[in-house]
Image (spheres, rainbow, N blue to C red):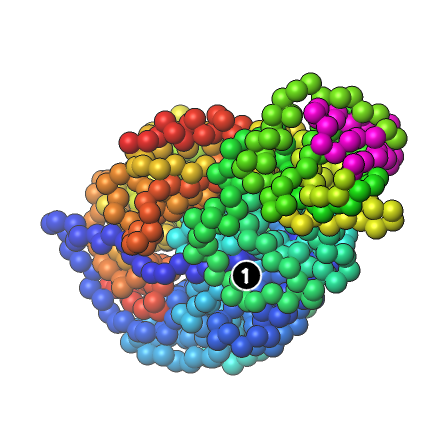
Amino acid sequence: MPSLKMDAPQGKTELVSRWTLDAGDYIAAAELSRDGRLCIVGAGDGAVLGIDVDTGREVFRHVAHPGGVLAVSMAPEGTQFATSGQQPNAKIWKATGELLRELPGGGSQWVDHVAWAPSGGRIATAAGRTVRVWNADGEPLLETEPLPSTVSNIAWRADGTALAATCYGGVYIWPFVADAKVRRFEWKGSLISLAWSPDAKVIACGSQDSSVHFWRLATGQDSEMSGFPFKPKALAWDSESKLLATSGDATVTVWDFRGKGPEGKRPIQLESHKSVCTRLAFSRRKCVLASGSQDSSVLLWEPRRTAQPVRYAFLEDEVTALAWHPEHQGLLGGDASGNLRFWEVS
Amino acid sequence: MKKIPVTILTGFLGSGKTTLLNRILSENHGKRIAVIENEFGEIGIDHALVINADEEVFEMNNGCICCTVRGDLIRILGNLMKRRDKFDHILVETTGLADPGPVAQTFFVDEDLRDLFQLDGIVTLVDAKHVQLHIEDSSECKEQIAFADVLVLNKTDLVSESELNALELRVTSMNSMAKVLRAQNADVPIADVLDVGGFDLARAVAAKPTFLSPEYPFEWAGTFEVEEGVYELLLEDGPDPTLVLVAMYLDANEQAHDKLAAERALRIWSEAAQETLPSSTVEIGGTQAASLQLKAPGTKRFSLRAGKAGRLGLYTQHLPVEFRLRLLRGESPMTPVAEQEFAAGHTHDDQVTSVGIHLEGEIDGERLNQWVSQLLREKGTDIFRMKGILNIKGVANRFVFQGVHMLFDGREDRPWGAAPRASDLVFIGRKLDREELTRGFELCRA
């Protein structure tokens, strides 16, 4: 429940909603296809929905993972997608909603994460302390040694040639090119969020102890940014890998990686949400940042230009999902009560 | 939004946690319960959600013990809470050797769980027969007992009544706050282990007058009926090389712990004690206390001579259970007619004890906050748990609070109603200084 309600920012325009849909339960995950026509949503009651982005029409709905969906990831070609939930198997579906195959998790633990590589046709899953990588036909390519603790996040390098995973204890990177070695960055703390910069140079993580870490892959240099009141669950890079937005408060903090980087520099502080920021997403096309909050508000920012929000919108409950249209035509948002809304942006 | 209660089940391997879990789950209580079981758990019940978890204890880089949490719980409970049809109760079972601190702290430290869940109670199962193997030297065992809101002495059919009494005294000397239940096959009423959050401290204080009793130099007083003759007093190795003891006659209807009797014992105690070596005799009704010399390893035997039949009041410097003190007539052990433990005026350095403080009058909220904050900052490592029901000036309702190590949270509870407005505070931990704590609390008076 949002504790405080944000008032509409004065003199700003509210985003126009194209459609709203009641998905039935907590929006746990949402993604848009690269052509911007299909959206896949996973809900807390275990349902996976396919929605036509133009009309908001529900194309299919399956109870995919009784107990709850945990992750959704679309193939770059948009013809298939993968889901996981509170079950020991991940599932691969056709974009039209037919189940293609299941990927076993190897035990009784939930498959917490699933991520389709941006290219190269690989799919990564994480269950318990083990990461597995599969090809598009569901054949196993890699099963890692168990990490020191449960995998908390996975992320592909933007070109799909390496996979990163975080856990309590650090970051691991497995390369998928000949002769490259597995890398590890140690950190005695629980890393709860992960974002790999689009230029592949920096790995950013939020930590349970309310700090943010950046590892520069070229040198292995680790920088810690602490002082957040809450744990930074949401992280987002802009498409040029220059700005990193982080949550950890009602204020959104944006770190500027131009020049010598954010160390020792005052970050950009974006204040307007009344309650803690829960989701962040940069539009791929323009340097526009969307932030969602526990107070149900969604704000658009142009952090290089102004520290004031430029547009705003509301959902009905805590914002739990945000996804941009790849051509910057709109923004998809979901909340903890199952409301799903698509706003026009351009 | 009502927070979802969480019950933590601890206890050594074989103490009966799984049996209790099974009983809770199979009973028809109409609750939707989710169980988070440790990786070795073996519950299989269809209508309950049972999740196996690796106990992942996360220490933070800052090294602060209160930041040590169970990462698996944060992740799993966070995911469970995404459903609309949420659970009514969460049960977390820990492995046998687990320290209950991190699991309890998780519900105070993590901002997401703190908003959604409330620690209802820590239930510790104790294997009445085998706990003797661990209780004196296993810190995990002591911590599990010290952290408990409810202590279930299980498998009572495997031990004698007097062994059970001794065990109960021992565990309550460590944790006077907990409700103690006896069970054979973990057969305790479910209502006594779930939803104990409303646990009434004032009632506990009423039931355990040691909280309020004056401080005597003895920790225990036992009342026995004796015949004329010689009895045998047996002691095993204990925490100290000596034990002071007073043995005196009582009036026919008197109990050793009655105030007048205890004060007579105190007068005898204040005379120089007679050094008494093993095999020698202590006379009941002597004018001096006996200082039993216990340096020799193994069982120490003393004779206790009753010059006449009557009622014996036996007062010991430490709890009998710490030395496995037994009184024998021939071969058969004597059971006390009555016994009472007194709050210790002293403690062994690392001994786990409870300190309960009762205060009349109103408390100044600001002063209390400052005192508790400073106390926990300095002593939080040694204070395992803290609970209080407070009469705060300007607050109409009872103010209840509880803490785990350095973390605490408080809130207004129900109105006082007919109950007398007063404050009770209980600490459980190591190296607790009763006088200092009492003084500190008294300074918080409005």
Q: Is residue B21 above or below residue B387?
A: below
Q: Chain of mark 1?
A: B
Pick whichever, B136 or B117, lies toward us: B136
Residue at the image position 60 percent from the left and 44 percent from the top = B254
Q: Is residue B117 magenta?
A: no
Q: Is residue B296 magenta?
A: yes
Pick whichever, A345 or B126, lies toward us: B126
Pick whichever, A170 or B414, lies toward us: B414
Rendering quarter of residue A319: bottom left
Q: Which quadrant is home to the C terminus of chain B?
A: top left
Residue at the image position 55 percent from the left and 53 percent from the top = B179
Name of the residue lying farthest toward the left = A11
In this rendering, would A113 be left or right of A279? right
Query: Where is residue B341 shown, x and y percent of the image?
Result: 61, 41
Q: In this orientation, does residue B115 appear?
A: yes
Q: Which residue is mark 1?
A: B193
Q: Is residue B28 above or below residue B115?
A: below
Q: In this orientation, does residue A124 appear?
A: no
Which residues are drawn in magenta?
A: B281-307
Query: Where is residue B139 shown, x and y percent of the image?
Result: 68, 39
Rendering quarter of residue A127: bottom right
Q: Which quadrant is home to the N terminus of chain B?
A: bottom left
Residue at the image position 46 percent from the left and 54 percent from the top = B199
